[in-house]
Amino acid sequence: MTNDISPRELLARLGAGEPRAGEIVSEVRTEAALPFFGEHGAAPAAGINVSGTLAAIISVTAVLSWQSAAAVQDWLTDKESDSPGVSNETELAELVSDTLFADSELAGSARYLGTFIVAGRAKRTVRMLIGLTRPVSEAQYASAWGRALAATKATDRARFDRIRTFLALLLDEETVQVEKMLLLSAVGDLIGHSIATGPSGA
Amino acid sequence: MPFSPTDCVSAARGLRLRPVPEMGTCLAYDPARARLHTLNATSWLLLTLCDGRPRAAIAAEFNDALRSLPGPAPEQGAFSRGLEQLAALGLVTTAANPHASMQTRKDTPP
């Protein structure tokens, strides 16, 4: 979908309404930090490196036993692929970015942002984040996963089995929650569209 | 902010616009103040018309544009209300019209 549209074109679609303008509180920061204790204090490479902009983030969160969380951690770092040096997590990232919407106009609009583990005293919270660069409905997202897994199963059964193992670790848990978080302020990239040069042409 | 019909109205400098047609809005980012705003299509049109012309000229084009659209137009005074909103958010600035000043001086008896 293109954003190259003028206000007159948008008005022609929507009809003229009462002018309405307001400020968006796009970010609230505090100076506080959350302390983590214990042997699993600092998470290595915990930052999310996102290039470009995201319209939404899908968060798959499950509270796992230490044993299951360790299995997730092991799975992410294991290198079972036929390609030397390619970890399971890299394969998962490729599936998300290359296959998830491959057969639709949304191709390339999903990115694997990472899987993060927060250690607690009795349980661990495991959170997988997937970024979407374009607005995608829940139905589109769900069916894309079905098609991507079917395609992987048809072309590379071993890889499919590895991905399924990981998804089962998260999704088979009764505590799993899948949330879609819209990032309103990130829908537009806000880059290079000034009054003078923007698509409005003003 | 009180406006004079002869005041020239401009969009704030450096403003960045990003239409989000699927949501019927346009985002406006003001880098000078690090503020993000959302405008509906009517306010977006109004903002893009604020290119330094006198307020009366902007009002004329704004009202012409709305009249040309199908469906009911906003209630009378929409232009003034919209401009006041934009001004309150710091998205437009006004300046006295130099030509209007010269005219006033010319007409003012010595």
Image (spheres, helix red, strand yellow):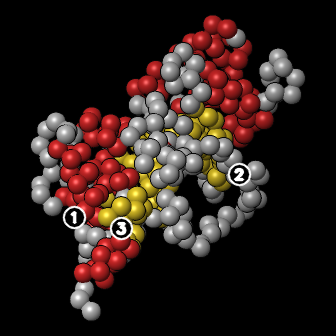
Q: Nearer the viewer, residue A116 or A119?
A: A116
Task: Give amino acid for label 1.
Answer: Ser
The residue pinned by badge 3 equals: B8
User: In screen coordinates, is A75 left or right of A122?
Assistant: right
Q: Nearer the viewer, mark 1 or mark 3?
A: 3
Q: With respect to residue B97, does B36 lie above or below?
A: above
User: In screen coordinates, is A157 left or right of B6?
Assistant: right
Q: Quadrant of residue B9?
A: bottom left
Earlier sequence position, callout 1 versus callout 3? 3
Q: Chain of mark 3?
A: B
Q: Residue at the spot x=29%, y=64% of the render?
A: B55
The residue pinned by badge 2 equals: A46
The residue pinned by badge 1 equals: B80
Q: Among all residues in the image, which is located at the extreme right?
A: A84
Q: Nearer the viewer, residue A54 or A46?
A: A54
Where residue A100 appears, as percent x and y from the top left, is: 57, 23
Q: Chain of mark 1?
A: B
Q: Quadrant of residue B68?
A: top left
Q: Nearer the viewer, mark 1 or mark 2?
A: 1
Q: Residue at the spot x=34%, y=77% of the render?
A: B102
